[in-house]
Amino acid sequence: MAPCPLCLDFKKKDEDDPRLSSELTPEQILDVRSRGTCSVCLVVIQGILLFEDETWSLKEDVSRVYLYALSDKGDTLTLEVYFHADRPKLVLEYFSSKEPKQGWEAIRQRNSINGQTVIPDGVRWTKSMLRTCSTEHSSCTQSEASKFPKRTVFFQQANNGDINVELQEHKGNQGTYAALSHCWGSIPTCTTTSQNLRGYAEAIPWTALSSTFRDSIMFCLELGIHHIWIDALCIVQDDTRDWEVESSKMADVYQNAHITLAATTSSDGNGGCYSANQETVREFEICPDILVREKVSHWQEPLTRSSAQAYPLLSRGWVLQERYLSKRVLHFCHQELAWECMEQLTCQCGGIMAACDPLEKVLLVRNINDLRDVTNKLPTKSRRWKNAKDRMANTVNSSIFSNIEEERILMAASSNTSDRGTLSQDKYFDQWHAIIEQYSALGLSRATDRLPALSGLAVRVSSIFGQYMCGLWYKNMLRDLLWRVALLHHDSVRPDCYTGPSWSWASINGAVKYWHDINDQRDQEEEAIRLIDQSISAQTWFERDEANRLLNRKTAGKSLVQWQVSQLRFSCEVESMGGNPFGEIITGRLHITGFMQRASLQYAHHPTASEQAQPLPYDPLQYLVSIQGVELTLPFFADYVLSEGPRKLLDGAAINLLLIHPNIALILLKHGRVFYTYERIGIVRQPSAYLALYNLNWMSENVMMTITIT
């Protein structure tokens, strides 16, 4: 029997395609309706017809319809309806109020939010989530009351209904408080300053508070909470010392808050948490237990441009650490509330998990005690290690390895599985890189907040990661230096104000990326170990020779550059503002001894045939490095636009490469007239095939130098 032409009996043609079927015309849809052979499709069609109004009809105005279902993210059945006229598409989602019955699995269970309001419905839902989180989530619970921050906003409702508000100072006393996460906007409406600090301690006029502040206070009262921490009010904004001290305590403030309220859809204080933003959701019941509504919007992670516009708070740099550090975050969205805690991401409608992934907070909470025990050390030399070395010497030409590489491979080969498991600390550094990638793409009102806006998160993990250096970790420095600006824009610049040394990602104003495929050299070692084992266990001379040939090819040309990388030595000097190593930086110097190679900068010129059609004879966002000693020219990732502006470099300018990884070098520019002082302007990666296949030493004329990068 042929499948239904509309729903295909919910059997996807292509598992990788989110669509259930190709585009459908109104004629096809109405034909299925007239035949009435598919009960599910009759429900789907009825759902479309319920949204018809005097402005459109399925037969006359719709051009095509797409069905989406059965994705691996758990979406419920969704329809996109497109129109002939210049009219926005209509997106509908079908859902069930109960567990779906057999044959209807594409229509998932969701919650109705029709007619619900933040007060009282949202309050009731929030209280239920708080009870569940406090009693069932081990990662979110607190064993004792938290200490108040230095200041909180205290409020209570008087008998006449007025809400009295004042700024209270605390000296170590404990209690329950909320925190607010919000966008300031271009013009802050209400802040604490040196002039009004004493007056606010007596009373803060209700009319002086922004809509967002008032909404958060009223919602807290509904929850039975009488204290809230709001940065604009609890930090004296014109007192530099107070700002430095209190902003350095962000980790404790958000971590100890009972709940963080997030004005996620408001771009400034006038937007409020819910007063002006709540939108109604049109829902219809098609048949018992099956409903249809306009699709409830959720943000997407990583944040897309449309999500950033709809949820402006999530595009701000300060907010990322607030979400990571808070035990519980309640997001006020356009149509509903969303809940984000250490163990759960959900919303009132129940569909947010199908739209975005929760923040992975394992770095901060889960397995934190296990992480403290990670030694990140290879096992010591033992009899097993010696035996492995002897066996290898009898089987493989060990001269193809440098001494350091041979030792690392042999020690890893002789260790058991549990030994290698102790190296898992690297995954936590990998997660830090993922956080930097996410954070660096977010916006800041002040360029100098590049490091302070992440300081709370850095403080939280410093007991595990060690010494913090301008956004990098000393014990992971060589890996942390491998950041790059993957996509250069015309506004990619190094800020005029100092935000960090050039070797730190904080020195530029855009998003950065890391190469995750080269973070761990052990992957290459594991491959070498496999080939060694294959050679040792070979049954014939031919098999052994083939394994040795592959091993030689795998490691060809690596000995010299591996050894040169192993000779890297470095130290750091960082001077921070106010003595807070996690906040704003005054200067940062990286003293490094390594192998340097001379090179020159080349603009990426357009082909001659197309020069007439181009405004410039070169691409201002792409650059090449010409390496001396070898006829090799490689594209590289510039940290900022090099062909324009006050930092412009001429085509052919002298630059230097500092080998930091066998296939990666920092691109350095001599800094003024100061001897042996450089600044980073980019990074280059040589294709690994050049070394593995052609035995090309791309750093053949390098020399060891001790330099300073500022």
Image (cartoon, rainbow, N blue to C red):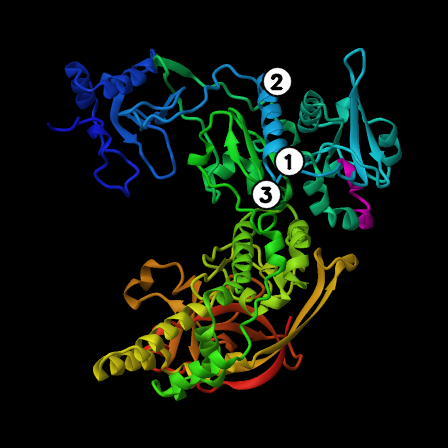
Q: Earlier in the sequence, mark 3 or mark 2?
A: 2
Left or right: where 246 falls relative to 609: right
Image coordinates for residue 441, horizontal then vertical, percent:
53, 50
Instruction: Tell me the amino acid under the disc marked 3.
Output: Arg
The residue range painted magenta reads 233-242
* Mark 1 lies on residue: 182
Picture quadrant of residue 583: bottom right
* Residue at horizontal 51 percent and vertical 82 percent from the top: 564
- Taking depth in this image into account, of 202 and 369 the one nearest to the observer is 369
- Asked if the residue under mark 2 is in contact with the one under mark 3, i.e. CB atoms within 8 Å, the reply is no
SS class, disc 1: loop
* Residue at horizontal 62 percent and vertical 79 percent from the top: 707
Q: Is residue 675 above or below residue 64?
A: below
Q: Quadrant of the N terminus?
A: top left
Q: Is residue 600 above or below residue 425?
A: below
* Mark 3 lies on residue: 316
Q: CA distance from mark 1 to mark 3?
A: 9 Å
Q: Earlier in the sequence, mark 1 or mark 3?
A: 1
Can residue 671 be seen here? The reply is yes
Q: Is residue 15 above or below residue 540?
A: above
Instruction: Tell me the amino acid under the disc marked 2.
Output: Ile
Q: Earlier in the sequence, mark 1 or mark 2?
A: 2
In this rendering, the label closer to the viewer, 3 or 2:
2
Image coordinates for residue 108, horizontal then vertical, percent:
37, 27
* Mark 2 lies on residue: 119
Binning the other alpha carbons within 10 Å of mark 2 as few (below 14), some (14 to 19) or many (20 upward) gives few
Left or right: where 276 falls relative to 20: right
In this rendering, the label closer to the viewer, 1 or 2:
2
Instruction: Tell me the amino acid under the disc marked 1.
Output: His
SS class, disc 3: loop
Q: CA distance from mark 3 to mark 2?
A: 27 Å
SS class, disc 2: helix
